[in-house]
Amino acid sequence: MATRWPVRRWQGVLAVFLGAVGFAAVLQLRAGMALRRAVELPTVRVRELAVLVRQQQEALAALQAEVEVLRRTLAEYEAAAVQGRVSADTLAREVRAYELVLGLVPVQGPGVRVRVDDSRAQGGVLPARVEAADLSGLVNELWAAGAEAVAVNGRRILATTGFRQDADGLSAGVFRLRPPYDILAIGNPDAMLAALNLRGGFVDGLRSVGLTVEVEARSTLTLPPYRGPLGFRHAVPVAP
């Protein structure tokens, strides 16, 4: 009997030691999984935003050049009307067409409505905030899918309208925006819905970081005209 007690005591110590090692291994595994989840999402988001910024810069440069050509043509037609060189009726139709392209008149038609909003804090997880790049990316997705006119929170958006953020929130050009953000786009609803609902697309990326994004087709939308500044401060036409 004297020899059995040390053996049993040694077995008990070994069992406690193995249990402690197993518990520590489980804690370390769970901590590693949580850390990977916390790091993976920002990394993916940074890569997506980098690609988005490059695409936006290229699209903006092309659209600004197109808008400048249209403005010069509109000015030429207006000058021609004053001089009576063309039919007044024909010229009026041309002017209305260019005003439509430049977003200077209200428009209506079928399209889609996209509402994006910040997420709420849940279970100790910090809320996700809508950023300027998120709104810019959504608008660019709509332009690329064939949108002919876009407005955000009741403000008409042109190809030259830039989104930015500061300590006070988000802005579209000279207009201050507040959440939730309602984006209305007139165009082919099916084409725009297909682009927005693409699996793994931009909208999926916004939802994956916790933002609330609602997308729906509308049979009729009415958008106001653009009311912001139109002048260029630095860009001038190239002399022939």
Image (cartoon, helix red, strand yellow):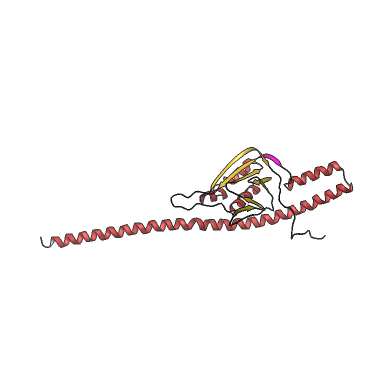
How many numbered tags mark residues here?
Answer: 0
The kind of secondary structure the magenta stretch mainly shows is strand
Q: Give the range drawn in magenta.
A: 106-110
Which quadrant of the view contains residue 22?
bottom left
Q: Residue furthest front?
A: 168
Where is residue 108? Give x, y as percent.
69, 40
Q: Which residue lies furthest to the top in this view?
A: 219
Q: Which residue lies furthest to the right in this view?
A: 84
Query: What residue is drawn where x is 50% and y is 55%?
Result: 41
Q: Which of 124 and 56 is in front in this view?
A: 124
Q: Which of 228 and 137 is in front in this view?
A: 228
Residue 213 seen in render: yes
Is 108 included in the stretch rendered in magenta? yes
Query: What residue is drawn where x is 80% and y is 45%?
Result: 95
Q: Which of 167 and 132 is in front in this view?
A: 167
The quadrant the N terminus occupies is bottom left
Taking the image as shown, residue 201 lies to the left or right of residue 126, namely right
Which quadrant of the view contains residue 90?
top right
Where is residue 169? Give x, y as percent.
59, 54
Taking the image as shown, residue 142 lies to the left or right of residue 45, namely right
Where is residue 74? Give x, y as percent.
80, 49
Which quadrant of the view contains residue 167?
bottom right
Query: What residue is drawn where x is 86% and y is 47%?
Result: 81
Is 92 included in the stretch rendered in magenta? no
Residue 146 seen in render: no
The quadrant the C terminus occupies is bottom right
Where is residue 119? Give x, y as percent.
51, 49
